[in-house]
Amino acid sequence: MTPKRFAECLASLRWTTIDLTSALQCQLAWIEAMESGQAEIPEDLACWLESLAKCHEAAGIPIRYRDLAQF
């Protein structure tokens, strides 16, 4: 996985690097190093992110709630 695809997956999931750090319970510096290309993204992590991102991309976001003001 490239750093670009890593960032695309996080964006698709609407996760920040801090969200991923929290999910993995790891160091933010390591996540930032992968994001910048200074650290290799492990294959199992790449597969997991790809799987999650593909699910989010396929499911889409319901649009019928846009501009809904009634509650």
Image (cartoon, rainbow, N blue to C red):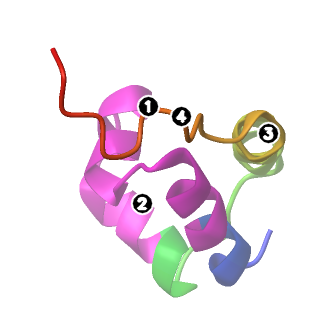
Q: Is residue 48 left or right of residue 40?
A: right
What type is the residue that disc 4 sits on? Arg
Residue 40: image location, x then y, percent: 67, 70
Closer to the chain start, of discs 4 and 2, is: 2
How many other residues sit within 10 Å of disc 4, few (<14), some (14-19) or many (≥20)? few
Looking at the rendered structure, the secondary structure element under dot 3 is helix
What type is the residue that disc 2 sits on? Ile
Residue 35: image location, x then y, percent: 50, 74
Closer to the chain start, of discs 3 and 2, is: 2
Vertical position of residue 38 compared to residue 57: above or below? below
What type is the residue that disc 1 sits on? Leu
Residue range of the region highlighted in magenta in the rendering? 7-33
| The label number, if any, that marks residue 64 in the structure image | 4
**Residue 69 within the segment the image draws in magenta:** no
How many other residues sit within 10 Å of disc 1, few (<14), some (14-19) or many (≥20)? few
Residue 29: image location, x then y, percent: 29, 64
Instruction: Please give the residue where the numbered disc 2 appears in the rendered image.
Output: 31
Residue at 53% across, 70% down = 34
Q: Is residue 21 left or right of residue 48?
A: left
Q: Is residue 30 left or right of residue 40?
A: left
